[in-house]
């Protein structure tokens, strides 16, 4: 079933078409407040220290919380977390708030769930296209058993397999 509100392919800008053909990880960014947002435009840069960079909406509650606390957490989502991704992206209703469902652990970086996540300290931000490029230094990583990632490609969630 196709989305009746989706922009037809021929009306999309060339940049949007290019971006849609690049597979992106589906991650959940959270911050003290609490606030959270599904983010697919992001990457991790290895180094000493490691860094996380992501494009987020400068008018989002997440950015307000990151700007205030200067801390945030990033967690990759897995195939079974499509509804969670949609909820934090604002595509599904969330009666009672974003964090009412599931088990959340409060950390200095924001609420997190069990599994892999990185705790980051904000070191910079700047406008980038229609978003804000946010850069954080990774201060801690909570590792867990490797799970298959949830991928966003051509407007849909996909699984590796």
Image: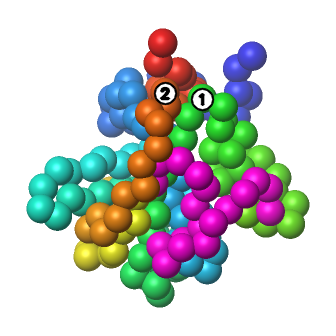
Indicate the secondary structure of the residue bearing disc 1.
helix
Q: Residue at x 59, y 52 (%)?
A: 114
How would you classify the magenta stretch by its main secondary structure?
Answer: loop
Q: Residue at x 46, y 84 (%)?
A: 69
- How crowded is the residue under tag 1: few (<14 C-alpha within 10 Å), some, or many (20+)? some
User: Which residue is farthest left?
Assistant: 48
Q: Relative to residue 92, is residue 75 drawn left or right?
A: left
- Is 136 situated left or right of 20 in this image? left
x, y percent for residue 126? 28, 71
Return the mark for residue 64: none
List the residue tagged with mark 2.
Answer: 148
Picture coordinates of residue 28 (x, y %)?
A: 53, 52
Identify which residue, 71 or 156, lies in the foreground: 71
Q: Is residue 18 above or below residue 72?
A: above
Secondary structure of the residue carrying numbered label 2: loop
Q: Between disc 2 and disc 1, whose residue precedes? A: 1
- Percent x, y of residue 14: 34, 31
Residue interval drawn in magenta: 100-117
Is 23 left or right of 115, judged from the image as shown? Answer: left
Q: Quadrant of the N terminus?
A: top right
Residue at mark 1:
79
- Look at the image and say whether residue 110 sits in the magenta stretch: yes
The residue depicted at 12 percent of the width and 55 percent of the height is: 47
Q: Vertically, is 38 above or below 4?
A: below
Q: Position of residue 29 (x, y in %)?
A: 50, 59
- Proximity of marks 2 and 1: CB atoms separated by less than 8 Å: yes
Residue 3 falls within the magenta-colored stretch: no
């Amino acid at each position: 079933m196709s989305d009746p509100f989706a922009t037809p392919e021929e009306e999309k800008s060339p940049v949007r078409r290019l971006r849609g053909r690049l597979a992106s990880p589906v991650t959940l960014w959270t911050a003290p407040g609490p606030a959270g947002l599904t983010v697919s435009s992001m990457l991790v840069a290895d180094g000493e220290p490691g860094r996380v960079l992501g494009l987020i909406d400068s008018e989002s509650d997440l950015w307000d919380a990151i700007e205030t606390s200067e801390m945030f957490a990033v967690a990759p989502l897995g195939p079974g977390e499509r509804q969670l991704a949609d909820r934090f992206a604002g595509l599904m209703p969330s009666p009672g708030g974003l964090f009412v469902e599931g088990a959340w652990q409060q950390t200095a970086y924001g609420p997190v769930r069990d599994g892999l996540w990185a705790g980051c300290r904000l070191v910079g931000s700047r406008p980038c296209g229609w978003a804000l490029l946010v850069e954080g230094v990774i201060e801690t990583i909570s590792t867990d058993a490797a799970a298959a990632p949830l991928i966003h490609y051509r407007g849909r969630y996909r699984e590796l397999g």
